Structures are given as structure tokens and as C-alpha cells.
Image (spheres, rainbow, N blue to C red):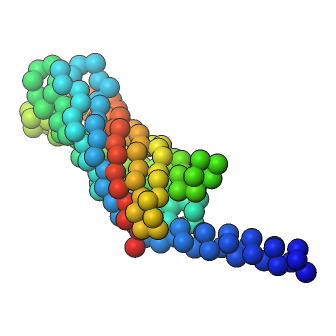
Amino acid sequence: MKKSLSTIAIIAASIATAHAATGFYAGGTIGKAYDNSATLSKSSDTDYSLLAGYQINQYFAVEGNYADYGNQIDAAGLTNKNTSWGIYAVGFLPLPTISDAVSLYGKLGMARVHTAVDAGSSANRSNLAYGAGVQYAINSQFDLRAGYDRVSIGNNVNVAQTSINSYSVGAIYHF
């Protein structure tokens, strides 16, 4: 009888934990974006993103975002402006040995990047995008996040193909 009650308690606690981690969320990040092209005279700028998602359970979420990677200046003095829309599958790995509130995350998806250059040329590129980081739950509604994201940009003769690497911190609100 004790074993049955213990088993039921463990299952109930697991369901309650998973249920508490489900639902819609929204947030934002701010950080530094680096273009890894060797032809830029200014290869980094402040970036920000707005995100929204649905937490399926404590291990998986689907997330969409809009990101503005700031301006990069090429060797000719032209400004490149990069923005993107993305959709990601996000996996979480809780770290209960550190704290019940800490988890690692990884995300993989597609981003549609728009690059505009002062000279009037522009490029749109849909490509694989990914990221990873750590997330800390302050309470049941607020999380802090620190992470790394990478997207490919450019696809024509006027906008070279390269990648943007973003390092950011942010906050998330669970509805």
C-alpha cells in the first residue's frame, strides 16, 4: 500500500511539474551581434529580439521571433542592416542538481533574414538557424535567459553570404 501511494505521489508530482511548465509565453532579448565577414570595418552592433512561444511540456517548446541585428559597415563604408523572422523547436534540459529553476536549452529552426545595404541592394535568405543557452525561472511566471544564436545572411553578388552570431540576455513572461 505504501509503495502504491508513493508511486501515485511521484506520478502526480511529475504531471503537476509538466503542467506548470506548459502554456504561452512572450519575451525579449538584448545583446551584441557579430558578423563574421572579414570585409567589414564595423562588424558588431547592439541587437534585440522579440519572441513568443508555446511550452508543450517542461522539455519542449515551439518559439517564433523577430530579431534586429543592428548595422554593420563594410570596407566601402556602406551600412548593412540585418533583420530576421524565425521559427524554432526548443528543447530544455532541467538541471535539478544545480537548482530546480535552472535549465539548458537548445533551439533549431528556420530564419528568414533580410539584409538591406545603403547602395540600394538587398537580399532575403531562408536558412537553418540555431542557438543554445541557459534559462533561470525566477518564479512560475518570469524567466531570465542568456544565450547564443546564429543565422546565415546574404545570398547575392551585392550582399556576401556570411553569418551573424548573437550573444544576448533576456526575460520571458509565462501567461
Q: Residue at x 41, y 39 (%)?
A: 148
Residue 155 seen in the figure: no
Q: Residue at x 32, y 26 (%)?
A: 36
Q: Quadrant of residue 65?
A: bottom left
State the quadrant of the C terminus.
Answer: bottom left
State the quadrant of the N terminus.
Answer: bottom right
Q: Residue at x 40, y 63 (%)?
A: 142
Q: Relative to the observer, which residue lies in front, 62 or 28?
A: 28
Q: Relative to the observer, which residue lies in front, 65 or 146?
A: 146
The percent position of residue 31, horizontal first and vertical second, equals 29, 41
The percent position of residue 96, horizontal first and vertical second, equals 63, 53
Residue 20 seen in the figure: yes
Q: Which residue of the protein is positioned furthest toward the right in this rendering?
A: 1
The percent position of residue 170, horizontal first and vertical second, equals 34, 51
The percent position of residue 37, horizontal first and vertical second, equals 29, 23
Q: Is residue 27 left or right of residue 5?
A: left
